[in-house]
Amino acid sequence: MADILIVINNYFHDLATAVLLGASVIMYALGKQAEKEGPAASATLLGLYRTLTKFAWGALIWIVLGGIPRVIFFRTHEFIPAIEKGLYTALGIKHAVMFSAVVIGLVLWRSVRKKIEVAASESPSEISRPEGLT
């Protein structure tokens, strides 16, 4: 049973990485669209940003918390099986891609926040500043 829970945790850990990247890419695309359309679109972006930020925070929290058992059981549930199956290189590539996805997601997320802050300073009556977000 413990092995099944570890595998499920690892799956959801990978899924959380995808959710973080997906939410951030959507935020970024909406931010680019808002730049083209002006202040009204930026006000709409703020509402969507707040919702997508909840998803991104949830994913980031799962990445950190789900990463703890993943690190603890990495050797027995990922590393040794990868070596036995000749997938050592693939495992390394997978983790490099996942790490890159988290970094890219965080960078995109922060870039949208900066766009919203700039839009809020230019049109403070139409757009409120994002609160407590990174």
Image (tube, rainbow, N blue to C red):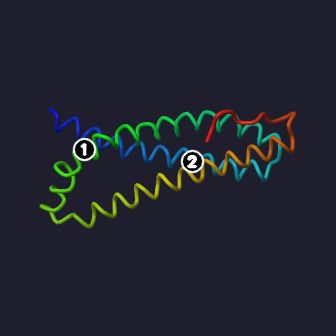
Picture quarter containing residue 1? Answer: top left
Q: In this view, does 97 lie to the left or right of 116?
A: left
Above or below: residue 125 compared with residue 33: above
Residue linked to disc 1: 72
Above or below: residue 76 compared with residue 126: below
Q: Distance between the residues labelled 1 and 2?
A: 28 Å
Q: Residue, x 41% and y 37% (percent of image)?
A: 62
**Circle 1 SS class:** helix
Q: Is residue 66 left or right of residue 79?
A: right
Give the class, few, some or many, for how many residues have Cα within 10 Å of label 1's Cα (few <14, many ≥20).
few
Residue toward you, 80 or 23: 80
The residue under label 1 is which amino acid type? Ile
Q: Residue, x 15% and y 56% (percent of image)?
A: 80
Q: Residue furthest left?
A: 84
Instruction: Measuring from the top left, give residue 23's x and y in whole percent.
Output: 54, 44
Q: Earlier in the sequence, mark 1 or mark 2?
A: 2
Quadrant, the C terminus = top right
Q: Residue, x 42% and y 56% (percent of image)?
A: 99
Q: Is residue 82 left or right of residue 68?
A: left
Picture quarter containing residue 40? Answer: top right
Instruction: Measuring from the top left, give residue 12's x and y in whole percent.
Output: 34, 40
Instruction: Measuring from the top left, give residue 58's x and y in whole percent.
Output: 48, 35
**Circle 2 SS class:** helix
Q: In this view, does 6 lie to the left or right of 12?
A: left
Above or below: residue 9 compared with residue 82: above
Q: How many labels does the image show?
A: 2
Residue linked to disc 2: 24
Give the class, few, some or many, for how many residues have Cα within 10 Å of label 2's Cα (few <14, many ≥20).
many
